[in-house]
Image: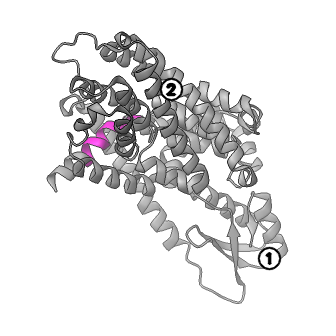
Amino acid sequence: MNAFFNSFFGILNEMSPYILLGFLLAGVLHVFVRPSTMTRHLSGSGFSPVVKAALFGIPLPLCSCGVLPTAVSLRRNGASKGATTSFLIATPQTGVDSIAATWSLLGPAFAVIRPLAALVGAVAGGLAVGRGTEEDDEQECKLTDADDESLRKMTIWQKIVEAVRYGLVEMVASVGNWLVIGLVVASLITVLVPDNWFIGLREYPILGMLVMIGIAVPMYVCATGSIPIAMSLMMKGLTPGVAFVLLMAGPAANFASVIVLGKTMGRRATALYVGSVALTAIAAGLIIDYLLPSKWFTLPGMSGDACCHDAASAGIFSTVCSVVLAGLLIYTFIKNRNHSYNHTINHTAMTKEYKISGMDCNHCRSAVEKALTALEGVTAVNVDLATGIATVEGDVTSEAVRQAVEKAGFEVG
């Protein structure tokens, strides 16, 4: 049990600064980037939006969990599933910080090939998702016209406050529960899988890559944190290609991201996402082991303190970030519970229930409640996200309710 909690809090400390940054970036995107701009560059099918999303994501220093709120915000603001997937693949696999650390610990060849492989894999995965999910590509919640109009009327300081509020409250409420579940599963895997389980595969590179995919994909490791692990695997005898599979597959997907993606992007898009990550990582690993000169991947000299991602280096900042993230998760959980309790409506002759389809998160629920509350004659509204039931009290027609819901971007079932 101690090992589980140590693993859980170690992962939390590793990821909390990045996921908080991701939530804040999501808030900035929500407030300062107009939906029309996002739609113009990242919506639609084809090559261009997918490439733009990959190039946008490669330099960002976000891990696979930190990238989630930013990607969800991109999706809500009009980005296509293909472009969103491209951003999701490219961003956690590399970043300006991890490129520098890769050069330092693994050498220039790894540092150059890593972002190139991230670009190729992101484009391939984005195109696959774009083509494989065209029929349901528009079934996501987006920023409504009413929201856009209200944001334009804000002063710069009001926008900053709204960006922080949206990122650290709305987005945490949207993905927080699934993030916690994913962290628990990832911690269990980290504890139960022995560190030396796959060292015997050094003589079988291809099999080693497949085993590495099976271990690295569900287990949480950030782009920078994967570097000393890959280095230690190479020092124990595994090939550079197998180590590179860990560098690419580990940061790009874990149970936390897969679970959240399944809820926000759909099962098919999530399966294509994970498949693209695995296939491109293995392809790059095979190229390194069988086509490129082995001398390119000789480890540079290291000092004893080269590895920087141990428990001692977590420091006060990571601990503070973990406390803040935990506090936000608790706050949004209590807030959601109080919302359901405080908005309970006693059924009367003036009360009607409507089944709303298309709601995936608290942002969706809030948009529907806002639209219905604004109707003349409505005295109380409660929207249950879990059941999709909107309870409306007041003198209002069903047709008026339907029109308000559809204007908000949803449907009355």
Which quarter of the image is occupied by the N terminus? bottom left
Q: Quadrant of the C terminus?
A: bottom right
Q: Nearer the viewer, mark 2 or mark 1?
A: 2
Q: Residues within 10 Å of mark 1 (few under 14, many from 20)?
A: some
Residue drawn at (80%, 76%), measured in percent from left and top?
396
Give the number of the disc on residue 396: 1
Q: Amino acid at mark 2?
A: Leu
Question: Tag 2: Cα neighbours inside 10 Å, few (<14), some, or many (≥20)?
Answer: some
The amino acid sitting under disc 1 is Val
Mark with earlier residue (2, 1)? 2
Q: Quadrant of residue 151?
A: top right
> Does the rendering let one see residue 210?
yes
Q: Tell me if residue 251 is in the magenta stretch.
A: no
Between 154 and 17, the residue placed more toward the observer is 17
Q: Is residue 299 placed above or below 167 in the rendered structure?
A: above
Secondary structure beneath label 1: loop
